[in-house]
Image (tube, helix red, strand yellow):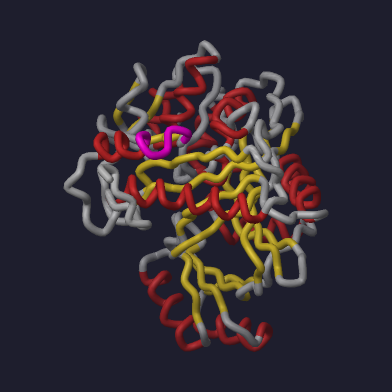
Amino acid sequence: MVGGGQLARMTHQAAIALGQTLRVLAADADDPAAQVSPDVLIGSHTNLDDLRRVAAGADALTFDHEHVPAELLEKLVAEGVNVAPPPQALVHAQDKLVMRRRLDALGAPVPRFAAVLGPDDLDAFARRVEGPLVVKAARGGYDGRGVRMADDVAQARVIAAEFLGSGVPVLVEERVAMRRELSALVARSPFGQGAAWPVVETVQRDGICVQVIAPAPELHDVGAGAQQLALRLAAELGVVGVLAVELFETVDGELVVNELAMRPHNSGHWTMDGARTSQFEQHLRAVLDYPLGDTDATVPVTVMANVLGAAQTPTMTVDERLHHLFARMPEARVHLYGKGERPGRKIGHVNFLGHFPAGDREQLTKLRERAALAAHWLSHGQWTDGWDPHG
């Protein structure tokens, strides 16, 4: 696996149970996966020789992130390396403009968009849309980075000039009037088998996912439509492994594709405790061309909350925070990544399983509040409800 982040770390955990060894190409010996995997190479994902070293003798080469240059992956494929997903699929997760054009050609629902080479392109698109705009860096963005909202054309011009000045290709989109954000997570094997987990709702703050509700409440027919769309895109694009299709549900109840990720995804972390097959095991099954696992939920509702680094790192150690969390919430399923704490950085997540009917709004609200309490405590060392552990 190229990349030594938390996704590689959790994929390594799944590999152990399958009797596999996950070799990791990490940038640093302190990377989350490098701390736990016995087979680590230190190197760069932009260096062909490092990529060759990590791929040597491996059954498959897969990814913790989308940032490996496609031209390097194509060279590996030409040399006989089994790259999964293949570069011709992965490019749709690497380049937003390539993705938008291909999805549009496939008839998938996408926002209206245009490539931006200069101010005239922005002006022409703004006249066509007549509404607020979203300006995006076509490459390199994640967790809200590279995505900026613009209230008018003048602001959009400034943002686009900033991106273009950095040598980054730019696209502009209409801002979708949305009810909420959803994620349809699926997997596809080289054999062509597909599997889909329940569609989830993702809750964002400042461009970063803070909570996931699985399944998304009150989906009705939207859920099946999202799963079918994600499976179709996986097949059309030739995906091997896990594919996350991030979606907007509009105020009119329609679905619009926002982003694609071809790897295990933050919106699928709930599967580690709430599904029969986790996304990490499924990704390995897919890239190794095993039959895919059962994606059914094991409980009616799972809530996942991300643990984000606080603005001020608490004086209390993570270990002590974990001690207090378990004393109050023994049912919490905690997954920490071994990462240093920085403001807004994902340092772990916590899953809470709900054993009540999925339609029980009151119980769901309580479970979400409990998950938020736990995540904030692990981040800040403070109970937002004033709970006193010694009271």
Image quarter of residue 334: top left
- Identify the residue shown where x is 52% and y is 87%: 152
Quarter containing the C terminus: top left
Residue 176 placement (x, y as % from top left): 64, 72
Above or below for 311 versus 230? below
Identify which residue, 222 or 35, lies in the foreground. Answer: 222
Identify which residue, 209 or 76, lies in the foreground. Answer: 209
- Identify the residue shown where x is 39% and y is 47%: 307
Could you tell whether 350 is left or right of 131 in the image?
Answer: left
Identify which residue, 166 or 181, lies in the foreground. Answer: 181
Could you tell whether 230 is left or right of 208 in the image?
Answer: right
Task: State which region is magenta.
Answer: 326-331
Above or below for 167 versus 162? above
Could you tell whether 316 is left or right of 322 in the image?
Answer: left
Report the residue that reaches farthest toward the right. Answer: 221
- Identify the residue shown where x is 26% and y is 46%: 341
Residue 189 placement (x, y as % from top left): 69, 28
